[in-house]
Image (cartoon, grey):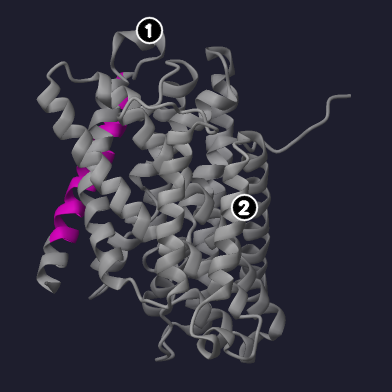
């Protein structure tokens, strides 16, 4: 009798990457400030992510190419090739270095929620951030893709149990929940929160990560149905986690005039209402979200830059290790120093906003090339891709206007 198993694979790395502290914080603020009204933005994000990640899976599994390599091969002109590579490299390198600080700090906040004393404040630096950085370092240093994939799958399952259990413990108004999912609305002051929800779910570096990891995991076009099952299970699982966080925050705090800015605030504030177990579930989820993203962000950066610069994409090569070490080291420095990297993360978000539609356009162009044969994009897939690009372009313009307005 065949042994059944969950269809978890490389797409789980994508879920681990987008369910990081940034998404957890955005979802928490969305629920606390606007109730269930913005759940439609999450639904769109998950559908858009599946559309784009299915293309990267085909590129890796069928085309045997990584997205960075594919972008480099699109241009015959050295000048255009250099400009395109420079834009993508600078945005990914700076953006992921900034986000890595948030990933490690988020995992540390999850651990700190278990303690009553503020050890970090008394020590003057964050020992938890250093420990998380070391865990990520040793795991990536092994160069064992299968081991990393299994570790990430375990973290995603832990995160799922934690956030979905808190959702069950704080049961929502299901009529409001379904209305928020399927009836779009935009309350006053909610535009930036919508941008945050979509922008932290549909992220460009996941396109590089997934094309490379799918290529490693599956060796032939016959495995494409498995790759698609992986996407259609793992990405919606991430969506359920985000919905659970929004719902928990909405049920516990919407309309109660309480200042809830992060999942740590939610974890600490939920204890008087629903007991210590609810607090610990939220804290566990935040820890798993932070550490899983702390591993995937350096890995994605190494794949992206190695493909663009025509470097060795073997995880054990010196150049590949050098890239992820740089990102991880920058993240540990930012997180353990106690700095609040608001301006750096602001820049990262602006870079992300510029980069996503550009990378999506490159991806759509690649998916219509002859080397894919019968697996190139269909008319429907192109239409869906263009819709996603149009929405991301509008969001990019809006986020840039907001950012420069802040300046």
Residue 165 locus on image (x, y percent): 67, 67
Q: Is residue 3 visible?
A: yes
Location of residue 333 (image quadrant)? bottom left
Residue 17 locus on image (x, y percent): 48, 50
Residue 383 magenta-drawn? yes
Q: State the residue in front, 227 or 82.
A: 82
Name the N-terminal-most of marks 2 and 1.
Answer: 2
Q: Quadrant of the C terminus?
A: bottom left
Q: How many residues crowd around disc 2 within 10 Å: few (fewer than 14), some, or many (20 or more)?
A: many
Left or right: where 374 falls relative to 278 = left
Question: Helix, strand, or loop for circle 2?
Answer: helix
Q: Quadrant of the N terminus?
A: top right
Name the residue carrying label 2. 156
Q: Which mark is drawn over residue 176?
A: none
Residue 60 locus on image (x, y percent): 46, 23
Location of residue 102 (image quadrant)? bottom left
Location of residue 280 (image quadrant)? bottom right
Question: Image height check: is 253 above or below 289?
Answer: below
Image point (68%, 60%), residue name:
161
Q: Which mark is drawn over residue 373?
A: 1
Left or right: where 369 falls relative to 11 = left
Image point (64%, 46%), residue name:
153
The residue range painted magenta reads 379-400
Residue 100 locus on image (x, y percent): 42, 58
């Amino acid at each position: 009798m065949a042994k059944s198993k969950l269809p978890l694979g490389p797409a789980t790395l994508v879920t681990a990457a987008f369910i990081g502290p940034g998404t957890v914080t955005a979802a928490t603020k969305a629920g606390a400030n606007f109730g269930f009204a913005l759940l439609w933005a999450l639904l769109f994000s998950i559908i858009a992510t599946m559309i784009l990640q299915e293309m990267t899976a085909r590129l890796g599994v069928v085309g045997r190419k990584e997205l960075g390599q594919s972008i480099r091969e699109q241009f015959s002109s050295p000048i255009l090739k250099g400009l395109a590579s420079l834009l993508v490299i600078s945005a990914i390198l700076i953006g992921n270095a900034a986000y890595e600080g948030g990933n490690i700090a988020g995992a540390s906040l999850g651990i700190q929620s278990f303690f009553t004393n503020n050890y970090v404040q008394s020590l003057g630096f964050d020992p938890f951030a250093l420990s998380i950085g070391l865990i990520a370092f040793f795991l990536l240093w092994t160069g064992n893709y299968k081991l990393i994939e299994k570790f990430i799958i375990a973290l995603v399952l832990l995160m799922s149990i934690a956030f979905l259990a808190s959702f069950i413990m704080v049961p929502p108004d299901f009529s409001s929940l379904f209305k928020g999912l399927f009836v779009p609305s935009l309350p006053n002051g909610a535009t930036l929160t919508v941008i945050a929800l979509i922008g932290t779910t549909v992220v460009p570096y996941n396109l590089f990560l997934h094309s490379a990891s799918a290529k490693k995991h599956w060796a032939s076009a016959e495995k494409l149905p498995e790759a698609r099952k992986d996407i259609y299970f793992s990405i919606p699982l991430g969506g359920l986690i985000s919905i659970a966080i929004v719902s928990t925050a909405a049920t516990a705090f919407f309309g109660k005039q309480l200042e809830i800015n992060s999942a740590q605030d939610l974890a600490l504030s939920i204890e008087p209402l629903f007991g210590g177990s609810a607090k610990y579930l939220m804290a566990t989820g935040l820890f798993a979200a932070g550490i899983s993203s702390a591993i995937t962000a350096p890995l994605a950066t190494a794949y992206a830059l190695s493909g663009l610069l025509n470097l060795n994409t073997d995880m054990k090569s010196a150049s590949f290790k050098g890239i992820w070490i740089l990102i991880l080291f920058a993240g540990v420095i930012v997180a353990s120093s106690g700095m609040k990297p608001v301006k750096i993360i602001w820049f990262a978000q602006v870079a992300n906003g510029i980069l996503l539609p550009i990378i999506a356009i490159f991806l759509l162009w690649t998916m219509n090339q002859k080397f894919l044969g019968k697996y190139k994009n269909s008319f429907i897939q192109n239409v869906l891709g263009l819709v996603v690009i149009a929405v991301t372009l509008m969001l990019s313009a809006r986020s840039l206007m907001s950012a420069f307005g802040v300046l």
